[in-house]
Image (cartoon, rainbow, N blue to C red):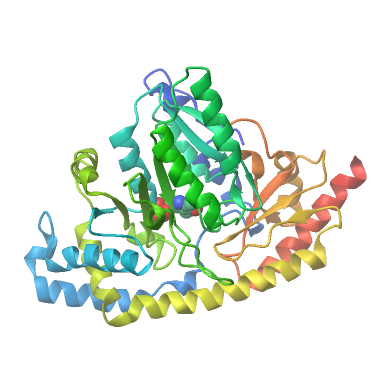
Amino acid sequence: MADDDRSGRFDHLLAGTVRDQLGGSPYGAWRSVRDADAVQLSFGFPFPESFPNDELAAATAAVLEREGDRVMQYGGGEYADALSDFVADRASDRGIDLESRTVSLTNGATDGLATVCDAFLEPGDTVVVGAPTFMGALTVFRSYGVELESVPVDESGLDVAALEDRLASMRERGLATPTMVYVVPNFQNPTGATLPEDRRERLVALAEEYDFVVLEDDAYGELRYDGDPVPPLAALDERGRVVRVGTFSKTIGPGVRTGWVIADEELEEPLKIASAGGTNTFTQSVVARYAEDGRYDANVRDLREAYGERRDEALASLSRHMPADADWTDPDGGFFVWITLPEGIDAERLLETAAEEGVVYLPGSMFYPEEGGENCLRISFSYVDSEAFDRGIEALGRAVRGAMADQ
Ligand SMILES: Cc1ncc(COP(=O)(O)O)c(C=O)c1O
């Protein structure tokens, strides 16, 4: 994963928190696989045909015609405001009480995470994350110079009982308890696991008991293909401990760079202070216009169907081509399957052979704050079509069998 085309000319000027991540960051890792002439299963990208480009073009024209200069001015016009209402209504539909909470629009979920971190974190604070967890969030947390404590993720997501033991032991030893616990409750990136309601309730209770904030990142919550939705953590929280982040990246397109933070109303001002420079009110206006008249909901319904089929075909490909000793998850939604290779096979070392065979993926170790996941990898079924996906998994099967034979 080393970034060997760097001269290091600026290293002495860079912030230590950034310098320490060079080469191992998602950006560094993506650079090393993006140009490989192989099936791309590394990226959690939506498939290109999913983008509602014609409708967005029409919405852009309509917004400019109706709001004229106001849409281009600082703060935007009525449509920009309408998007907050749209997000608030959908949150209410999922059981979140908006009486005591406010919606702040952001430039995507990652910007939402960074805004919340800006408001809460100082160097030396402790943030608890699942192991494994979304690597983009790890990059954000690391850039604040915080201590990352990890709690295992099992087939039901974050192990909240293990978190409780850790918190009790921190308190017993007189250590500072965490400022924040980060969780991706639905179809977690990278494992696809969904946190059951009892764990969600316990996590919210622990936040009150140990005085921390739960950062709920629900980037995939709308993309459920099987089973019933589980209430968001924010819907189970009566004390305003949960700060919830969402995004239109997966349900409209990452290019709109529009997401949101839903937080206790007392946090509105801190979040405003933290998000200096403002957000993209022009895109927010376009998205609000596009979402009118149920178009967004219709798009989400179509996406669920399309991704659900891709998920089914992905699982069928895995059963066809992977050796019996490999194991993988069976997600109810989202974009990812997490594969565990036989013990002793290093997914990072295997990547080069896999690329030669015709597939690239992200090695599991990238999703761990410390050591871990060496024999695991993440694949995404969201981006390539099912024919290419099948070819990719066939190539992965060959690469893994080769590595097993060499052991
Ligand atoms: C859990 C999670 N959060 C956030 C994001 C990023 O969202 P955005 O593109 O809105 O910044 C992703 C996408 O990769 C994700 O998997």
Indicate the quadrant where residue 228 lies.
bottom right
At 51% from the left and 74% from the top, the residue drawn is 304
Which sits in the foreground, 283 or 183? 183
Evaluate whether residue 3 shows in this view. no
Q: At which x and y percent is residue 293?
A: 27, 82
Look at the image and tell me in which quarter the C terminus lies: top right
Q: At which x and y percent is residue 279?
A: 23, 51
- In the displayed structure image, the side of residue 42 where residue 141 appears, left or right: left
Q: At which x and y percent is residue 34?
A: 57, 51
At 21% from the left and 66% from the top, the residue drawn is 285
- In the displayed structure image, the side of residue 217 where residue 54 appears, left or right: left
- In the displayed structure image, the side of residue 366 where residue 66 appears, left or right: left
- In the displayed structure image, the side of residue 149 where residue 106 appears, left or right: left
Look at the image and tell me in which quarter the N terminus lies: top right
Query: Is residue 312 positioned above or below 381 on the image?
Result: below
Q: At which x and y percent is residue 162?
A: 60, 37
Q: How many marks?
A: 0
At 35% from the left and 31% from the top, the residue drawn is 121
Question: Residue placed farthest to the left in the image?
Answer: 69
Query: Is residue 299 positioned above or below 389 on the image?
Result: below
Query: Is residue 76 positioned above or below 55 on the image?
Result: above
Which sits in the foreground, 283 or 109? 109
Evaluate whether residue 18 shows in this view. yes
At 47% from the left and 17% from the top, the residue drawn is 174
